[in-house]
Amino acid sequence: MKLAIVGATGVVGSKMLEMIDYYEIPFDDLVLFSSKRSSGKKIDFKGQTYTVEELTEDKTDGNFDYVVMSAGGSTSEKFAPLFEQNGAIVIDNSSFWRMHDDIDLIVPEINQPSLKRKIIANPNCSTIQSVIALSPLHDKFGVDRVHYATYQSVSGSGAGGIRDLEEGAKGEAPTTYPKPIYNNVIPQIDVFLDDGYTKEEVKMIDETKKILDNDDIKVTATCVRVPVISSHSVQINVTLKKETSEEEVRETFKQFDHIVVMDDVQSGVYPTPYEATDQHKIYVGRIRKDPTLENTFHVWCVGDNLLKGAAQNTVQILKSLIDN
């Protein structure tokens, strides 16, 4: 099996290599691609040294079986169809393909690719952890309405976001964010649209409906960047269709293998980014009934945005394709 990684020198690309090792993805040949700026770099992986190559059009015809991409929307727009035309299955971590009608948007714990096309989209990082929390509730009770409020770490913006936080602590001006992130929170992720929502908020709204295959769910969101290196937190306020209790919601989470319940507030037990970083599951806690809305619950949800929110989910998709 011949495998390529596009964006191999980036923050998510390096995590993809870790996940390929973790999930023991078998390959006979591995090719690492990057932009011209990072080409020529050496990466040691599984006892072998790889030289990173610049991705150009002619290199897409390399008899690849699978290509995983984390190099931004414009790169994916240009190169994913070329890899596809040359016979590869492409798993793309950018936002470009997610809402195309003929492209599968996949969280392997929830849905499986139909492969109408050989491009598969990896969802937004905050969406992934949120739909993992919503999925067992959706299956058991039905979901009528969801409000998200996110607290997203700077690593979601790659090396530039981490730089803004670390250098901001030294008094340096931001180069990635519109305002300083050190000792601050920024209620803007991506650009503002005409209706006042940001593109990140619209991603969460649209992707939730597509992954859960339910356009009738009412979804709204506010996405906020916070001065944390890794792991996103999401406050989920969810209205269910079937009447239930806080205890049954909690038990439903416990029965879902992909979720860790940390919910004993009297003993100070609830998840934070500290517990979730470098972990492969999604953490939930602070589960409680919302007394202002009928059959509505608050759920605090935390997950590692570089792992399950990006590289891990991508490689899980790859593993499911290989296994099946």
Image (cartoon, grey):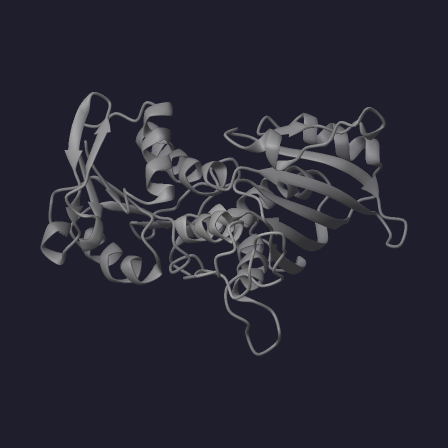
Residue 227 x/y as whole percent: 58, 48
Please report the residue visible at 9 percent of the width from the left and 55 percent of the height from the top.
Answer: 58
Residue 153 x/y as whole percent: 55, 47
Relative to 228, is 320 above or below? above
Residue 218 x/y as whole percent: 68, 60
Can residue 107 be seen? yes
The answer to whether 236 appears left or right of 86 in the picture is right
* 102 and 31: which is toward the camera: 31
* 31 and 134: which is toward the camera: 31
- Tell me which corner region of the image, top left, top right, bottom left or bottom right, holds residue 32: top left
Please report the residue visible at 16 percent of the width from the left and 29 percent of the height from the top.
Answer: 49
- Tell me which corner region of the image, top left, top right, bottom left or bottom right, holds residue 319: top left
Please report the residue visible at 16 percent of the width from the left and 33 percent of the height from the top.
Answer: 50
The answer to whether 249 appears left or right of 53 in the picture is right
The answer to whether 164 appears left or right of 322 in the picture is right
- Tell me which corner region of the image, top left, top right, bottom left or bottom right, holds residue 288: top right
